[in-house]
Image (cartoon, helix red, strand yellow):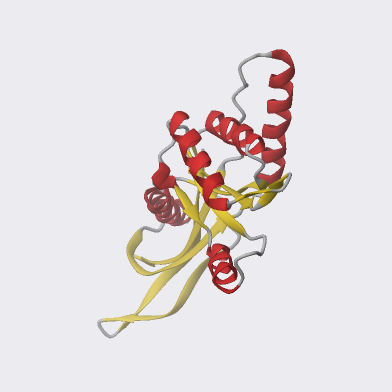
Amino acid sequence: MKTGILLSLLVFFSVITWGQEYGAGKEISAIEVVGTGEMEVVPDEIFISFTLKERFEGKTKIEIESQEKELKKRLMKLEIDLNDLQLSDAASDYIKIKRKKSDVIASKDYILKVKTTNEIAKVFELLDEIDAFNANIQRVDHSEIEKFKNEVKMIAIKAAKIKATNLLTAIGETIGKPLLIQERETYEDQPLFRKTALMVNMAMDAAGNQEEALPEIGFQKIKLRYTVFARFAIK
C-alpha cells in the first residue's frame, strides 16, 4: 500500500488574540490558529455496478436466475469471493415485478467489490461476455479509511501546535495549554472514476487484438483533508 502524506502548516487564518479567556479569576492571553493535515491513499476497494436483464435468444427466454448462476460460476474461476457480490437497493423492484407479473422482462442490479485494477479488467471482460448492462465503476474506497482519517486528524492537531509555537517564539512568548480544539473535516470525492472505467474497457479491447497481458491501470488516489481550529494559552 502506498500512501502519501502532506503536512500543511500554511493555513487560511492566524490571529493572536488577547481576548476574554478567564481561568482562576484572571484574564488569559491566547493565540488562535488553524492547522491542516492531508493524506492521499491508493484505494484497495473498487465497487463495480452492473445489471442483468432477462432476454430472449430466439424464442427461448434467458431467466435472470440462470444468468446469475453463470455469473457466480465464472467469478469463482477468477477467484473472486462471492461474498463481495451483492444486490443493490434497486433490485427490490425486480422482486415486486416478478410477484405481480410472471411474463414481464425484469432486471436485477448488482454491486461487486474487487481489490485490484487487474481484477477490474477481468470482471469487465466477464460482464461483456455474459451480456451484462450498465457496467461501471460506482465508487472506490479503502478498507482502512477510518484509520487514515484518524492519522490525518493527528497531523492537523500537531500542525496547529507547531504553528502556534513558531508564531509565539517569533515574538518572544511561550505556548501554554490548549483552551479549545474544534474539528473541521472534509472528504474529497474523486471526479475521474468514470474516466478510469473507460480506460479499463479500452485496455481490454487492445488486449483482445494483441494477446498481451493487461497493463496495470492506476487509480486516482483518495484525498483526505482535515483542519482544526485551535486556541492555546500564552504563558
* Res. 45 in view: no
Q: Quadrant of the N terminus?
A: top left
Q: Nearer the viewer, residue 132 or 195?
A: 132
Quarter assignment of residue 105 = bottom right
Quarter assignment of residue 214 = top right
Q: Nearer the viewer, residue 117 or 91?
A: 91
Q: As drawn, is 137 to the left or to the right of 34?
A: right
Q: Residue 88 in the image: x percent, y percent?
A: 53, 59
Q: As drawn, is 210 to the left or to the right of 172?
A: right
Is residue 149 positioned above or below 129 on the image? below
* Res. 56 in view: yes
View extreme (bottom): residue: 25
Q: Residue 119 in the image: x percent, y percent?
A: 53, 32
Q: Residue 109 in the image: x percent, y percent?
A: 58, 56
- The residue that appears at 61% across and 70% down in the rendered structure is 101
- The residue that appears at 63% across and 32% down in the rendered structure is 125
